[in-house]
Each structure stands twice: as C-alpha cells, then as structure tokens.
Amino acid sequence: MEGTLRWILYGVLALCLVADVVVPPEHRYFFWDRIPGFNAFYGFSAAVIIIIVAELLAGTGLRQDEDFYE
C-alpha cells in the first residue's frame, strides 16, 4: 500500500509540473514566476528545510526523557 500511494503522489507531482509548464499564468509580476516549476521547487525545498530544523530542535533538548513525569 505504501508503495502504491508513493507512486500516486509522484504522479500528481509530475502532473503539477507539467501543468506549470503547459498552462501559463495570466499575470507574472516577479522574475521567478517565469521559471517553469519554480513554485514546486520552492515548496519542496521549504518543506525539507522545515523538517531539518525540526529534527535539529528535537535533538537539542526539546525532547524529554521517558521517565520525565515519574
């Protein structure tokens, strides 16, 4: 099941990238709006950075010992 869901999500990501290239936006205000797939790359990299920062914060003492409340 996990492998099937992963491939479905990869397919949706591919469709979003193709749609970003094929269907041009009506208004392009910034220079990065002209780069195909930039929004997908920006969102993916932001999610990766959030995960890395969360792991770093968890390793620096935000976690409590298992017997913290005992």
Image (cartoon, rainbow, N blue to C red):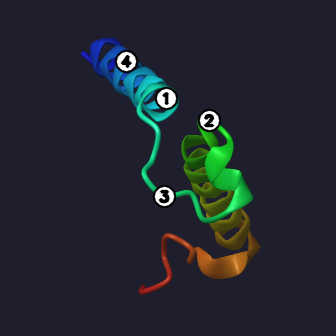
Question: Foreground mark, 4 or 1?
Answer: 1
Q: Residue at x 62, y 35 (%)?
A: 36
Where is residue 55 shown, x and y percent of the image?
66, 60
Q: Residue at x 65, y 45 (%)?
A: 34
Where is residue 28 shown, x and y percent of the image?
56, 57
Q: Quadrant of residue 47?
A: bottom right
Q: Quadrant of the N terminus?
A: top left
Q: First in sequence, mark 3 or 2: give its number.
A: 3
Q: First in sequence, mark 1 or 3: give its number.
A: 1
Where is residue 54 shown, x and y percent of the image?
62, 66
Whether the residues at callouts 4 and 1 have beta carbons within 8 Å, the answer is: no
**What is the distance, in whole Å, between disc 4 and disc 1 at their CAs?**
10 Å
Question: Foreground mark, 1 or 3?
Answer: 3
Whether the residues at callouts 1 and 3 have beta carbons within 8 Å, the answer is: no
**What is the distance, in whole Å, between disc 1 and disc 3 at their CAs?**
18 Å
Q: Which residue is mark 1?
A: 17
**Amino acid beneath label 1:** Leu
**Amino acid beneath label 3:** His
Label placed on residue 27: 3
**What is the distance, in whole Å, between disc 1 and disc 2 at their CAs?**
8 Å
Q: First in sequence, mark 4 or 3: give its number.
A: 4
**What is the distance, in whole Å, between disc 3 and disc 2 at their CAs?**
14 Å
Q: Residues within 10 Å of mark 1 (few under 14, many from 20)?
A: some
**Amino acid beneath label 4:** Gly
Q: Which residue is mark 4?
A: 11
